[in-house]
Amino acid sequence: MKADEQRMTDFGFEPVWTFQDNIYWVPHYIEPHVWVTLAGITATTDELLNSKAFLQTKYLWKRRWVEEYIYQGRSRVMSPQDLRLILKTIDKTVRKKDLRRGKS
């Protein structure tokens, strides 16, 4: 496999907003609470809620630039320390979201 090819197994369930004529808004990933269309048009979560868009999950192919942002030039082979750091970051993010929603 070439370095610029992406594995066909790089899929996962992602949140997607659907609006009007099947316009899909996917997470921006780098900017929080921002969603983007394939045309590059952005909207905030509040704007999508006010526009009566429908939130669902879809099985999407992960974008390589997201992976590049996560690794930021580091080796793709993670050490146990790297994995602990990533899991700790994810855990903090989930806890913050739960606290905002009133869950403990």
Image: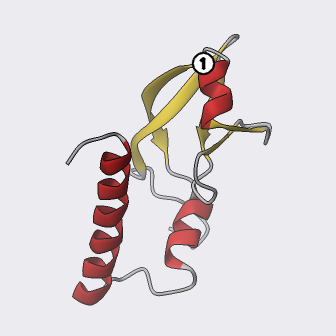
Image side of residue 5 versus residue 10, left or right = right
Quarter location, residue 91: bottom left
Q: Please, what is the three-letter code of the amino acid marked with disc 1?
A: Ala
Report the colour scheme.
Answer: secondary structure
Q: At 70% across and 11% down in the image, what residue appears?
A: 21
Relative placement, left or right, of 30 versus 103 is: right
Tell me residue 44's x, y (percent).
67, 39
Q: Residue at x 57, y 55 (%)?
A: 29
**Residue 102 visible somewhere in the drawing:** yes
Q: Is residue 76 above or below residue 54?
A: below
Is 41 drawn above or below residue 67 in the view shown? above
Residue underneath mark 1: 53
Please tell me whether residue 84 is drawn above or below residue 42 in the rendered image: below
Badge 1 marks a residue whose secondary structure is loop
Q: Quadrant of residue 12?
A: top left
How many labels were placed on the picture?
Answer: 1
* Relative side of 94 to 66, left or right: left
Asked where in the image residue 68 lies, by quadrant, the reply is bottom right
Q: Residue 8: horizontal and vertical position, in percent?
A: 44, 50
**Vertical order, 95 against 75 (above or below):** above
Q: Is residue 2 visible?
A: no
Q: Position of residue 57 (x, y in %)?
A: 42, 30
**Mark 1 surroundings within 10 Å by alpha-carbon count, few (fewer than 14), some (14 through 19), many (20 or more):** some
